[in-house]
Amino acid sequence: MKKKLFFFTIALFFFFHSGLSQSKNQIKDRKIKLSYTQIYDHRKENTNRIIYSIYDKNGNTIELKEYKQDSSFVRWEKTTYNSNSDILISLSLGPDGQTIEKTEITYNSFEQPIEQKVTDSSNRLIETNKFEYNAYGNKTFERQYDGNLKLVSYSKFFYDNKDMLIKKETYNSKDELLYLKEIKYGY
Amino acid sequence: MRIILALLIYFTSNLYAQNQIDFRGMPQSLIDYRASQKISITFIGNTLFTNDFHKLGFAFFDLGCKYRINRSFGINLNYRSLAKQLLNDNFLWRNLVYFDFDFSKPMNRLTLGGTIRFQNQFIPGQMPILYNRSKINLKYRYSYYLQPFTEFELFTPVIHPTRNAPDQFRISLGVNYNFNEKYKLESYYQLRKLSDRAANNTYHVFSLNFIYKL
């Protein structure tokens, strides 16, 4: 449940952030260093937001602070990237700058993520995700482990002969199918 | 008028040297076994029809191993056994070992690539010959299926008994067609121009390569 919440939060972050801001390339081209965004949503109460963002020279968001209109804290994120603009470390901070959660991602020489580790404020491992790829560079396995490195679930990915994902299966540690997604393409 | 006269003298002097212009056809098959993202084993079977497609001039098979360091760089080590048909219709066998250092840099739909190749040639009873055959290419990804490309290759002798300057260049213009991840067809026209030789021939090569990934 905690893991699902984490991924949902990350997905929500990317969805809203990309919706609100300019693209990474636009920010890079214009050499923008920071932005200050105010959001007023008159459809709902208490949803107005202020977002401060700081960017690196490649247009990546390296720091993001979000507050409500009454200055109450919503979130504070810090992210570091490698030279290829892939996320290396993502920190979720509290209002006083204390680390709440830290996500570290390691990559292979083909710039594909192979491991993602999530630790809490006391640097205790919460979960680990490991990824595997086939000879053509397509992700074939994703394994989720808990804080004790015990397998929680795993996913298998299948592709057609044009490298398009056609099936994803997710199993629990007892090899019971939890989730199945199948896609058919018309060529 | 003087320019026209100069050009006339230039081209007629080339004719006096009896340089040939030859149209050639080159069907080729390549089998690529990908053991992993990093390692591939390749096998190439190639034939070259010369004398305006009338005669089997060359044939070779090639066995190689490719190691991809990362997305941009890779190295190859290949062995090639080549048979050249002589005027008396006998075949002269040559053995080549070559080492490639490949690089590629994608830039949106364009990919700039290149190869630094050192090729060592052994002919029984003769001294080894070492060539630097470096090439640079540019590929445009029009779609998943179609990728037109162009390539320039220069032959520079490093160890050679008689030649010490670039003695051949090749310019290619072609297109790759991906049926899927396993089957690919590559077709190109290549201009081969020899220089620094007794007869500086020009060859027009039409190539059709079938590529199969295991």
Image (cartoon, grey):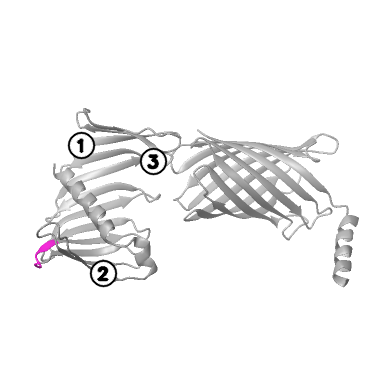
Q: Secondary structure at mark 3?
A: loop
Camera-near label (2 vs 3) is 2
Q: Is residue A63 above or below residue A182?
A: below
Q: Which residue is mark 2?
A: A35
Q: Please provide percent x and percent y for residue B102.
A: 54, 52
Label for residue A151? Answer: 1
Tell me which label, 1 or 3, sits earlier in the chain: 3
Residue B73 lies left or right of residue A58; in this view the side is right
Q: Is residue B21 above or below residue B90?
A: below
Q: Please provide percent x and percent y for residue A158.
A: 36, 33
Q: Residue furthest front?
A: A43
Q: Please provide percent x and percent y for residue B164.
A: 74, 60
Residue A168 visible, this angle: yes
Q: Which residue is mark 3?
A: A138
Q: Secondary structure at mark 1?
A: strand
Quadrant location of residue A132? top left
| Chain for disc number 2 | A
Residue B69 lies left or right of residue A167; in this view the side is right
**How many residues crowd mark 3 within 10 Å: few (<14), some (14–19), many (20+)?**
some
| Chain for disc number 1 | A
Camera-near label (1 vs 3) is 3
Camera-near label (2 vs 1) is 2
Residue at 21% over, 51% down? A12
Q: Nearer the viewer, residue A131 or B167?
A: A131
Quadrant location of residue A44? bottom left
Residue range of the region highlighted in magenta in the rendering:
A70-74
Q: Secondary structure at mark 2?
A: strand
Residue B13 lies left or right of residue A94; in this view the side is right
Does label 3 lie on the same chain as label 2? yes
Q: Nearer the viewer, residue B192 or A184?
A: A184
Q: Please provide percent x and percent y for residue A125.
A: 16, 49
